[in-house]
Image: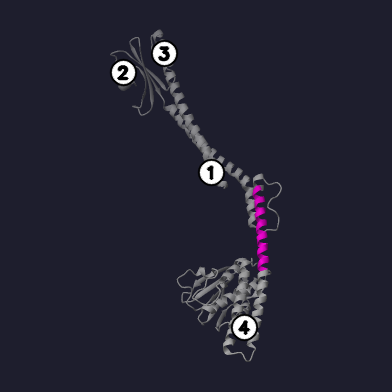
Amino acid sequence: MRVRIAVSVTAMLVVLIVAQSLALVRLNDEMEAEFIDGTLDEQLQYSIEHSRRLGTLIGPQTPNMTLHRLAPGAPLPQGLSPALAALPVGKHEDWSAGRELHVAVREADGLRYVLIYDESEHRAREIAVVTTVVIGGLVLTALSFLLVYAIAARLTRGLETLAQRVEGERDGTPFAQPGLDPELLAVARALDRAEARQAAVLARERDFNANLSHELRTPLAGIRSDAEMLLTEPALSDKARRRAERIIATTDRTATLAHSLLLLAREARPQGAEPVNLRAAVQDAWARLHAAGAEAGTLAIRIDERAEITADPGLLALVLRNLLENALRHGEGRAIEVVLEDQRLSVCDRGPGFGAEDPGRSFERFRRGGGKPGHGLGLALVQHICAACGWSAHAANRPDGGACLTIDFGADSASA
């Protein structure tokens, strides 16, 4: 904005300077023409009167004017061209000599007087003046730009400070502070009101989410408990037993879905960061998957045993669980590889991959690939947690087949 203000004001000043300069040049030309005409008239009148009185030609005393007197039938004086000598009585401008000449012709006492004014010296001075004006205009333009830019910077410094406070970490201090300009104070008060409304909305959402989570967990726990009790009945038929197992599985999926939706609705900020052994965290997440009844598979871990990452253990475990579960679901029973290279953790499978679609769309909510079972929130939750922790999530197809999901922990976040 500073540059735009400076350019706009400077452009306006340049237009005014150019217009004024052109007007001055035109006025100078008109005044110069009048001055030359007056000078020629006065000089001719003076020369004719004194020549008549003294009997000899009295010429001008300035080097840029030359006077010639012609008698009828007499040869042309030296330095007077036939073209100038043939000019009629009056004032004329001539360029035949390669420079601008003002010529005044008058007849008196049967003699012809030709006064020539060479304007070369005047034009040289005029060019020098114009050059000076142009250079001065350029210097004035540059100084104007710098001055306006400095003034604009001073005027917009308050906006920059306010913008930095909006982007920075909030400590509850109001944006409106004493000493602000009236315009900035109005913006700051509007920001305070908007922040208060946003805080109220977030508070209501958190209360609603907490209540919803509590209300869902109780009936889901009751349903699962009843289904488990049914499974303990010895006289239960095989058909009823399978239905009870499906009830338990559906209840677990519903609980997982509710938990995922709850986390996605929250900010999911890390509650506490501590060093976590990455290899052990992957092994623990894999073990928990199989303890929860996940399908069988093989895992190849290529992570240094000393590799650590500073993170919230709970959020990291949730990310690893979802990545491994996604690889199990789409890997078609083939080996899963987990690799750590340059602070980038990759979980790769040997399944069909993402196909022709954009791999980045796999992080969209409720997007399920390949018709596999699931609620379509696992990778969306991964991206949500990564954004909250300052990490980045990426998806790509492997050149030799399969999908690869990568978490970039960033510089200085992981060490071996």
Q: Label 3 near label 1: C-beta < 8 Å?
A: no
Question: Mark 1 highlights which residue?
Answer: 7
Please check the rendered image and state whether residue 286 is part of the magenta-colored stretch, yes or no: no
Q: Mark 1 packing: few (<14 Cα in 10 Å), some, or many (20+)?
A: some
| Disc 3 element | helix
Q: Amino acid at mark 1?
A: Val
Q: Label 2 near label 3: C-beta < 8 Å?
A: no
- Quarter the C terminus occupies: bottom right
Say if residue 135 shows up in the picture. Answer: no
Q: Amino acid at mark 4?
A: Ala
From the viewer's perspective, tell me whether residue 397 is left or right of residue 308. Answer: left
Q: Considering only order in the chain, which callout, 2 or 3, is on the residue closer to the N terminus?
A: 3
Q: Considering only order in the chain, which callout, 1 or 4, is on the residue closer to the N terminus?
A: 1
In whole angstroms, how far apart are the C-alphas of marks 4 and 2? Answer: 126 Å
Q: Mark 4 packing: few (<14 Cα in 10 Å), some, or many (20+)?
A: few
In whole angstroms, how far apart are the C-alphas of marks 3 and 4? Answer: 124 Å
Q: Name the mark on residue 291.
A: 4
Q: Mark 3 packing: few (<14 Cα in 10 Å), some, or many (20+)?
A: few
In the image, the segment drawn in magenta is 186-210
| Disc 1 element | helix
Question: Mark 2 highlights which residue?
Answer: 76
In whole angstroms, how far apart are the C-alphas of marks 1 and 2? Answer: 62 Å
Q: Amino acid at mark 3?
A: Gln
Q: Label 1 near label 4: C-beta < 8 Å?
A: no
